[in-house]
Amino acid sequence: MTTRILVVDDEPQLLRALRINLRARGYEVEVAVCGVDALRLAGVAPPDLVILDLGLPDLDGVEVIQGLRGWTEVPIIVLSGRSGGPDKVAALDAGADDYVTKPFGVEELLARVRAVTRRAAAGEVASAPVVSFGEVTVDLASHLVTRTGPSGETETVRLTPTEWNLLEVLLRAPGKLFAQRQLLTQVWGAAYVNQPANLRLYMAQLRRKLEPDPSRPRYLLTEPGMGYRFSPGR
């Protein structure tokens, strides 16, 4: 089944380039040059993925994300010339799955497209409760974390309830970029949304327990100015 992608941008040259590159990779592509058209097209023929610019001539891209999130969980990759942290956080908080800053490499964007479409097709990890990365295996159903030692022995990794909750959120959406506010709200609650020190502390603790080299994380990644993601294949 062909993946349908809705590209929303008001730059004709960029739209043309994306249409050509995506179709060359076998995707079906629909384009829109404004937010109103994007919401209308998505409602008439729901896409499998949306690539969305924030700087549209009628609606702000965040408003488009909010409009889509009112009825669909379709993956959304934001493609924008806005490099400021607040814009990124606003887009992620509204429900975007990833954020690519202009100018960008086509291959980078295509890699992001493959990642979010794989995650959507797999239903994230809801039907596959065992996640493995590096020497670590996490059984989401039984709340069990094990690690294989250098001699092949298996040891249980003890996590606190908060560490477990944070790890589970990340593992259930591999590759998804979470803004700090999203993680703080999901793990600690809305009252902690302005306490990022909590998140930094617990991410550091998880890395010490699960990463081969906590100072150079391979799986529990920080995206500067945006948030965190779990990358299983790095």
Image (cartoon, rainbow, N blue to C red):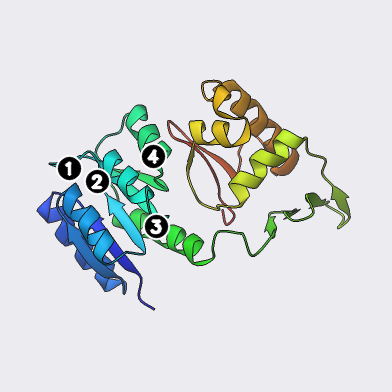
**Residue type for callout 3:** Val
Q: Nearer the viewer, mark 3 or mark 2?
A: 3
**Residue type for callout 1:** Leu
Residue lying furthest front: 71
Asked if one can make out residue 213 in the rendered structure from this viewpoint, the answer is no
Residue at 66%, 46% in the rendered image:
168
Distance Cα–Cα, label 1 vs label 4: 16 Å
Query: Which residue is identified by label 1?
Result: 56
Residue 18 placed where, x, y %? 22, 60
Residue at 30%, 39% in the rendered image:
62
Pointer 2 or 4: first along the chain: 2
Q: Secondary structure at mark 2?
A: loop
Distance Cα–Cα, label 3 vs label 4: 13 Å
Residue 156 placed where, x, y %? 85, 48
Q: Residues within 10 Å of mark 1 (few under 14, many from 20)?
A: some
Q: Quadrant of residue 207?
A: top right
Distance Cα–Cα, label 2 vs label 1: 7 Å
Pointer 3 or 4: first along the chain: 3
Q: Quadrant of residue 124?
A: bottom right
Q: Is residue 159 above or below residue 152?
A: above
Q: Residues within 10 Å of mark 4 (few under 14, many from 20)?
A: many
Pointer 3 or 2: first along the chain: 2
Q: Quadrant of the N terminus?
A: bottom left
Distance Cα–Cα, label 1 vs label 3: 20 Å
Q: Residues within 10 Å of mark 3 (few under 14, many from 20)?
A: many
Query: Which residue is identified by label 4?
Result: 94
The numbered dot on residue 53 is 2
Q: Nearer the viewer, mark 2 or mark 4?
A: 4
Query: Which residue is identified by label 3?
Result: 74
Q: Secondary structure at mark 1?
A: loop
